Image (tube, grey):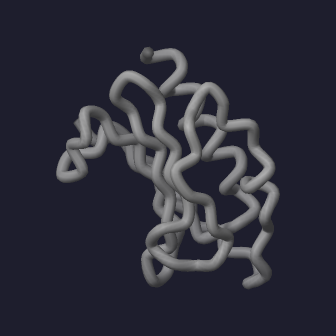
Amino acid sequence: MLIGIYIDNYIGVEMVNDWTTIDYSPGKVEYIDNYKHEDMLQVSYNPSFILDMGWYGDKYIIYIIQDCDWDNPLYMFSTLDEKELKQIILKCKNIILNTI
């Protein structure tokens, strides 16, 4: 099941890095990179969840993946606004923690 939200209110082009300061515990940060590209953030949550974020040409996409099923994300959120990343990522973290 894919549940998503598209937030369409672009503000500026400067990268806001406050999402890099999030406490992702009890997850394990596999990688974190604040440059705009597909592999910006990946956090593994046991037993079977992944929080993943990347820049896909014109927007950020944040996925919640369960059981390594990348073809069928559990949730997908997207935004054009870097300032919304922290809020969306924290929402995803809470979804995962309330599911495990």
Q: Position of residue 69 (x, y in %)?
A: 21, 43
State the residue at coordinates (81%, 56%): 18
Vertical order, 81 against 51 (above or below): below
Looking at the image, residue 91 sits to the left or right of residue 3; the answer is right
State the residue at coordinates (47%, 61%): 61
Vertical order, 26 against 23 (above or below): above
- Which sits in the foreground, 50 or 71? 50
State the residue at coordinates (42%, 40%): 50
State the residue at coordinates (39%, 33%): 49
Vertical order, 19 against 40 (above or below): above
Looking at the image, residue 75 sits to the left or right of residue 42; the answer is left
Q: Position of residue 1 (x, y in %)?
A: 23, 35
Asked which quadrant contains residue 89, the reply is top right
Q: Position of residue 95 (x, y in %)?
A: 51, 26
Q: How many marks?
A: 0
Looking at the image, residue 91 sits to the left or right of residue 51; the answer is right
Vertical order, 9 against 74 (above or below): below
Looking at the image, residue 7 sits to the left or right of residue 76; the answer is right
Asked which quadrant contains residue 67, the reply is top left
Q: Position of residue 47 (x, y in %)?
A: 37, 22
- Which sits in the foreground, 34 or 13? 34
